[in-house]
Amino acid sequence: MLKEKTVIVTGGAKGIGRAIALEFADNGANIVLNYRSALPEGLVSEIEAKGVKCLPFKADVGNFDEAKALIDGAVSEFKTVDVLVNNAGITKDTLLMRMGEDDFDSVLSVNLKSVFNTVKFASKVMLKQKSGSIINMSSVVGVTGNIGQANYAASKAGIIGFTKSTAREFASRGITCNAIAPGFIQTAMTDVLSDKVKESVLEGIPLKRFGKPEEVAKLAVFLAENKYITGQVINVDGG
């Protein structure tokens, strides 16, 4: 179903984004691999070894013009945009009393404004096609909130509202829009946590383990393939 489709993955260089790009490639999709700073050596080759094409594209999707360039580049190379996965995200955690303006603005720009930017431009292509799937990466923190993450939680909660609104706007043209809300997934971001913090987090997870990036990636592929699910927020958090 995804063979030779065009899938854009923002923040695709590592962690969940990398896993999503590889999972879509496993399902026959061509990948537009967006990254902001550096691309791990060998990742493009690893994707293309699966028999698909991969276009690496450096862009800060929080920047309106660079996001447009990403979508334009995808269309120029592959002619269509079938799936957009908005995974780009950063954290700048600190208590609100210590949070600087840049700590707030930069997180909102990368995490939330980037979603507006890419969806605005990709949806123009999808509306003409009368088909497409948009998958936005939120977080359980966007649902529950978390101490020291007012900026991050605000950005992820904003993604949920944005997703539900665009799902309603685009449904009549055959475009689905859903959000995934991961819990604690085993990535470089969680690897830096102390053992004490990890133990505390695990106590609150019924399955008693962190999730794997591949488990989020498989859900992304499922949502891209299913044309009767839209406007939903699905937690991947171990219960």
Image (cartoon, rainbow, N blue to C red):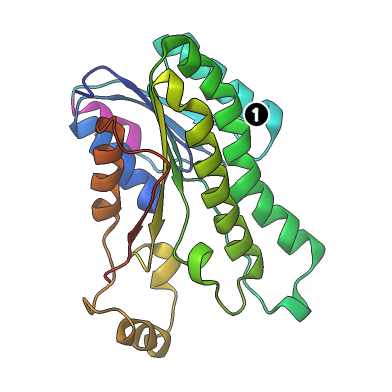
Which is the main secondary structure of the residues drawn in magenta?
helix
**Residue type indicated by callout 1:** Glu
Residue 60 shows in the view: no
Q: Residue 141, image x and y in percent?
A: 50, 67
Image side of residue 212 versus residue 184, left or right: left
The magenta stretch is 42-50
Image side of residue 212 versus residue 34, left or right: left
What residue is rendered at 68% in x and 47% in y?
A: 109
Residue 15 shows in the view: yes
What residue is rendered at 61% in x and 47% in y?
A: 112
Helix, strand or loop at label 1? It is helix
Q: Residue 72, image x and y in percent?
A: 56, 16
Q: Is residue 136 magenta?
A: no
Hey, which quadrant is residue 70 in on the image?
top right
On screen, residue 201 above or below 119 = below
Q: Is residue 45 magenta?
A: yes
Image side of residue 214 versus residue 189, left or right: left
The residue singled out by tag 1 in the image is: 66
What residue is rendered at 25% in x and 17% in y?
A: 4
Q: Residue 124, image x and y in percent?
A: 55, 17
